[in-house]
Amino acid sequence: MTERDRLNPTTPDAGRDPSPTPVGGVAATRGEAVLSVQGLEKHFPITKGVLRRAVGAVRAVDGIDFEVFKGETLGLVGESGCGKSTTGRLLTRLLEPTGGTIVFEGRDISHLRPGQMRPLRRDMQMIFQDPFSSLNPRHTVGTIVGAPFRIQRVKTEHGIKRAVQDLLKLVGLNPEHYNRYPHEFSGGQRQRIGIARTLALRPKLIVADEPVSALDVSIQAQVVNLLDDLQNEFGLTYVFIAHDLSVVRHISDRVAVMYLGKVVEIADRDALYASPRHPYTVALMSAVPVPDPRRRDRAQRERVLLTGDVPSPINPPSGCRFRTRCWKAQDICATEEPPLVPRLDDPASHQTACHFPVVEGEEVAGRRPAGASA
Amino acid sequence: MSEDHSFLDVRDLRIHFRTDDGLVRSVDGLSFRLERGRTLGIVGESGSGKSVTSLGILGLHNKRNAQVSGEIWLEGAELVNSPPEAVRKLRGRKMAMIFQDPLSAMHPYYTVGKQIIEAYRVHNNVSKAVARKHAIDMLGRVGIPQPARRVDDYPHQFSGGMRQRAMIAMALSCDPELLIADEPTTALDVTVQAQILDLMRTLQHEFNSALIIITHDLGVVAELSDEVLVMYGGRCVEFGPATTVFDRPEHPYTWGLLGSMPRLDRGVTDRLLPIAGTPPSMINLPSGCHFHPRCAYEPRTGGLGRTVPPELNRAGGGSHLVRCHLPSDERQRIWSQEVKPKLEAQ
């Protein structure tokens, strides 16, 4: 993935470069890795009794590896309990990993103390999901967006107030609302305030945790376009965490799919959506309702209906975690955890953790037979 | 003529709330009909009035706060002007609701079984034993495994998807003819959503219920609905068969909604096409057409959009209705020549 050009966002043709298939390995055509995660784990202990003995752990993130390259958007997608939000918090070190490493710009930040992390926080920031709880209701917008400058003691050219007003304009808000409080804004506007705050120090990496899920559809589109434009203008790098596969597809260059604390598939965006390999990815994509009534019957026929619920992250299934709901599971799936590697003819950039990856055109069990839909 | 042959007939429904800041016109003249066995999808964003409508049909608004006017005819009985006791008798038995968040809609201190049993015994004169058997039967019908054991579990002991199934079981326990589902899958994961939508479709056919599904998700609407009603600012702005509204929409707001959504069934576009501006304040609604400040085509109405509220008028053909000042043939032209090509652009 070449570094994104600095495009003027008002040019009608401004857009993203399509991600070329890497030649000669991943590192050759991409920019350098801003973030590199290896064997990352976060186990939350469960304690019992007065003495609080650890009797088990919620294995929220249980050994994941990926890299994030400069200027790209890595989409992290999965359902509740898959560990994607926990991963987002680990990346920004709001949580400390219980295993594995996080390397940011060549430096291992896995176990840095808060004092050591603080200067790094100029370079990595987070956008949160809930526009209502992520802004201090007792601070004005000016205080909220200006806080990064004060906390990091960054000198501004014309003063913090001016810098804040410039940021408000940048995200499409009226700079005269500097002295207003969060409750005076709508959900979409509050999310923009959060984005302005995130951008204040021009971070190198932004982790966006479900930034548009709480917004109405028409406002979602405005904020997604804004994030796109800002990325083009400032060469930002995003990790975009979401459960909405359509939004993730629109904004991401590469996508990683998570299930029960593991990454089950990771690929360039187009490759993942065109030929998903992991059965869970296939099920996930087929579950998205298509806004076309004429395709309703066909969509229902082709839908993979997973049975049952997601197993508990306290006691995940042995071997491959998805095997309890997978129509392709065989004995080896219970005994041997499949590694995340390229399968079939896939390029190095497309990795799947499955012993029996799905081939295009393959008959998928779990689909309702034609004519049986209600 | 006060009687109508439709199973559900809503006429000029208005639900206003008096507040310190002014009158909130949440629903401002809504009319539609629905037959048994059919599904109506009501689409709208926050503040459009869709949830207030569903609560209004069930008679769940507090008369002290809400001014409800208009008529709601349910199989020959008019509800708005009926005494609360009469409406309460119908709630649960003839009409029932599935709420968005089962955790807040169900009582946390009572087991799921007890809640279903209570609802069943209010409307049916049976013993507790019979009611319990029925509750277990319903839980099994909605796909909850081991229903005989889970009937004694509390709502918090169920996962999100199972809780929603339990709520559906509760809603269906008295065999209602009208089912209103208010954002039933918004809080659920997409794979669970697929299961629940599948379940609702199956049960609707089995019970031959009239189903109103209220959502902001156009994908869900397309999956389930026979007819679609788009709400904006407390009013219906477009109504028609689902295929028509998705294929040949004629209201600029509907165009905007379709443009705002990234879709898996089309190529990836450069930018989404959002609707300019923000949803209106329900206290200070814009004059004339409520949508006009956000409408790119308002200038083509020669000032009418700003001053005169448009009426619902016939679109393309058949039962397709649109609330817009632009003439239908111009709307069709704009859709096919200007809007649709941009949506499908790659």
Image (spheres, coloured by chain):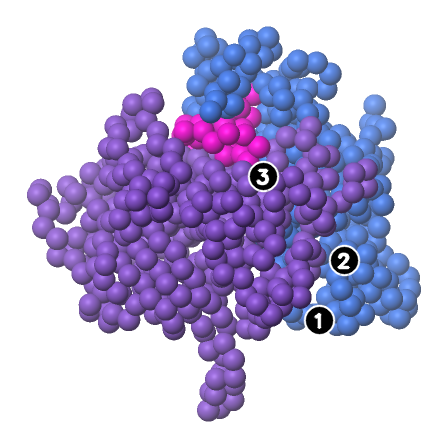
Chain colours: A purple, B blue
- Mark 2 = which residue? B143
Within 10 Å of the Cα at label 3, are there few (<14), some (14-19), or many (20+) other Cα atoms? many
Mark 1 lies on a secondary structure that is loop
Type of amino acid at the residue the image marks with label 3: Asp
Q: Is residue A283 above or below residue B211?
A: below
Give the labeled residue for mark 3. B217
- Is A233 magenta? The answer is no
Residue A370 shown left or right of residue A248 in the figure = right
* Quarter occupied by residue A231: top left
The residue positioned 52% from the left and 23% from the top of the image is: B344
Q: Sort mark 2 into few (<14), some (14-19) or many (20+) by Cα contacts within 10 Å.
A: some
Q: Which mark is residue B153?
A: 1
Q: In which quarter of the view is residue A301 placed?
A: top right
Chain of the residue where label 3 is placed in the rendered structure: B
User: What type of secondary structure mainly makes up the magenta span?
Assistant: loop
Residue A322, horizontal then vertical, whole percent: 60, 60
User: SS class of the residue under badge 3?
Assistant: loop
Q: In this rendering, which labeled residue sits more in front, label 2 or label 1?
A: 2
**Range of the magenta residues?**
B251-278
Image quarter where the N terminus of chain A lies is: top left
Q: Nearer the viewer, mark 3 or mark 2?
A: 2
Give percent across and percent down for residue B35. Answer: 81, 33
Q: CA distance from mark 2 to mark 1?
A: 16 Å
